[in-house]
Image (cartoon, rainbow, N blue to C red):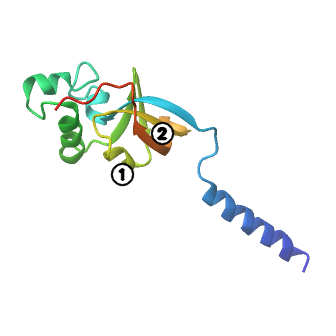
Amino acid sequence: MKGVPIITISVALAWFMAGAGPIGTPQTFIGEISDGPCALNVHSRTRSHQEMRESKSIGDNAVKCTLFCVKNLGGQYVLLSKTDVYRLDDQEKAAKFAGQGVKLVGVLGSNRTIHVTSIELDSQAKPPEQ
């Protein structure tokens, strides 16, 4: 019977840790919800949607370009913050802000992946072109 409390504690601790989410301090990140191909220079030389807007081949603004690249080119939503690109674990939350400047709160994990807590429009960012 001595083993029962240890097993119970072990199971309870494992259950708690599984639901606790990533371990780390939440940080605030400022940037644009972009798509991987544009942010990582796959079809852009400037880490932006500039070439796509000018050619009007994929979309004439950041929102359309981001949505197109994710839907049709296999891209994922990422956070482009100055010259840093971060993966986002919650693609559904990110989709609502495609091509827009945001303030994102989350925990930075391995492989430059942010475990997203919240995303909101950044009041300092210029609105997306329409």
Residue that numbered label 1 is attached to: 92
Residue 20 bears which disc, if any? none
Does 101 sit above or below residue 93? above
Expressed as whole percent of the image width and height from the top left, the position of residue 47 reads: 29, 23
Which amino acid, mark 1? Glu
Q: What SS does tag 1 mark?
A: helix
Using a 10 Å C-alpha cutoff, classify the residue at mark 2 as few (fewer than 14 neighbours), some (14 to 19) or many (20 or more).
Answer: some
**What residue is shown with label 2?**
113
**Kind of residue sitting beneath label 2:** Thr
Q: Residue furthest bottom?
A: 1
Gap in angstroms between the C-alphas marked 1 and 2: 15 Å
Q: Nearer the viewer, mark 1 or mark 2?
A: 1
Image spot of residue 9 (x, y percent): 80, 67
Q: Position of residue 112 (x, y in %)?
A: 48, 34
Q: Quadrant of the C terminus?
A: top left
Q: Quadrant of residue 39?
A: top left
Q: Which sits earlier in the primary sequence, circle 1 or circle 2?
A: 1
Q: Quadrant of residue 51?
A: top left
Residue at 39% in and 20% down: 83
Looking at the image, residue 74 sits to the left or right of residue 57; the answer is right
Residue at left offset 25%, top offset 29%: 42
